[in-house]
Amino acid sequence: MERTSEPMETHLSWLMWICAGLFFFYQFVLRVSLSVIAKDLMKDLEIDPCEMGQISSYYYYGYAFMQIPVGLLLDRFGVRRPLLFANGLCFTGTVLFATAESPLILSLSRFLMGAGSAFGFLSCMKTITLGFPATKISFLVGLTVFVGTVGGTSGSAPLAILVDYVDWRQALFFLSAFGLCVLSLCYLYIHDGVGDSSPSDNQDLKGIEGLRLVLRNPYTWIYGGYSAFMYIILSGFADLWGASFFMDVYSLSRIQASWAASLVYVGIAVSGPSLSWVVERLESHIKVMRYGAIVGLLAFGTMLYGPKLPINVVYLLLFLTGWGCGAQFFSFAAISIINPRHLSGRASSVNNMMGMGSGIIFQPLIGYLLSLSSGNKGYDQVFELRDYITGLSVIPLGVVISLCLTFFMKETFPKKSS
């Protein structure tokens, strides 16, 4: 049966959200950290671009394949135990990566980071929906996205500064120490009294029929496809190859290049509240997702295919790319509405799995296309603009597919009662 009363907002609710939000911040730092150290890693361990893409993609294997289990675990056990387990996976993966000497261990480390990171966003959502009244949910979801994308920014330029003072291995040890602090806070302040599952949730977990219902809904695949192809902007560019692009094509320093790539996340952070306002004005999720794809396509396409522009103009284009990419987060609202309400958690898990799963395919593919275009499988090389045009062209192609999918969507914005 449905809950009959609104959850009470307390100081403990906020403490739990802050702890879950810090973990979400931390997993975003881990996600984008490889873009900062990619050149050093390829040189030190003699890894070519295709191998680099494959190693990075294991983060997305762990993240994507854990989405459904994470939703079930959070429903079954609440937030505390799953989030402590997730912290432990990320900490272990980071330490292992910092000491790795082979592609196999590097891949395993990224897989552990991804598997642990899979708990981040959904833990925040579980804490919000069960610890706060409905009137606060939209605000806190936007705030959560903002916190995460700040982590994406912090995993770029600030980490690049740290790597310039110490080597990449020591920098990762610093990240693991931060993760240990987050784990300690989660242990102290997250309790099963808030954010645990209701009897109806546990009852619904006796079978997988709910998941089957979500997967049998064709709109699940349409909205999930939109997320997957829009997310290539992040997985293919901001999370891995963006910093290398600016170092090779624009001759920027590591710090400048990392800052440039992180502007995509700055745009996403701003898009949360601003696009929410646009949704309210247009009274449409579909229009905002469509316009977001158009803005992202035009901005990224201009940067990639247009004449070499002044760097400040490129910064603006990167920000606009991220702002348009932020429209993908409305697919979470849409996919939850288009499926039965009591299955919204599983629907969100499927959507997140499809979005993050794009990194599994496209990070190695971009690396392969870079190597193919350059004709050089070497690990210590500088790619030319034409190589990046070849490799990164899968990104605007993916956004075009997302744009096309918006014409097959069903409007999910709630109609106002007359």
Image (spheres, rainbow, N blue to C red):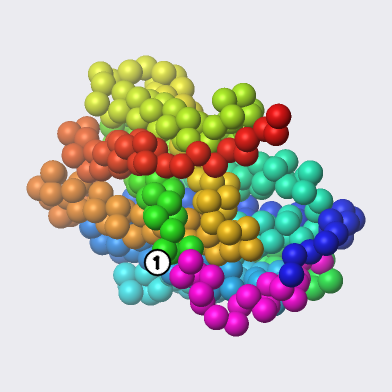
25 with respect to 200 (left or right) = left
Assign the N terminus to one quadrant of the image: bottom right
Position above or below: 2 against 258: below
Q: Is residue 88 highlighted in magenta?
A: no
Point 63% across, 35% down: residue: 415
Q: Residue at x 62, y 24 (%)?
A: 281
Q: Which residues are magenta?
A: 194-213
Q: Secondary structure at mark 1?
A: helix
Residue at coordinates 30% horizontally, 62% vertically from top-left? Answer: 54
Please give the count of numbered marks on the rendered protein.
1
Q: Is residue 107 among what the camera can see?
A: yes
Left or right: residue 397 versus residue 170 is: left
Instruction: Give the x, y percent position of residue 310.
Output: 37, 17
Towards the viewer: 154 or 317: 317
Above or below, comparing residue 104 to residue 405 in the picture:
below
Q: Position of residue 246 (x, y in %)?
A: 35, 34
Q: Residue furthest front?
A: 418
Amino acid type at image mark 1: Tyr
Q: Which residue is drawn at the image coordinates 57% and 53% (left, top)?
A: 336
Residue 233 place in picture, x, y as percent: 39, 41
Which residue is labeled 1 in the image? 61
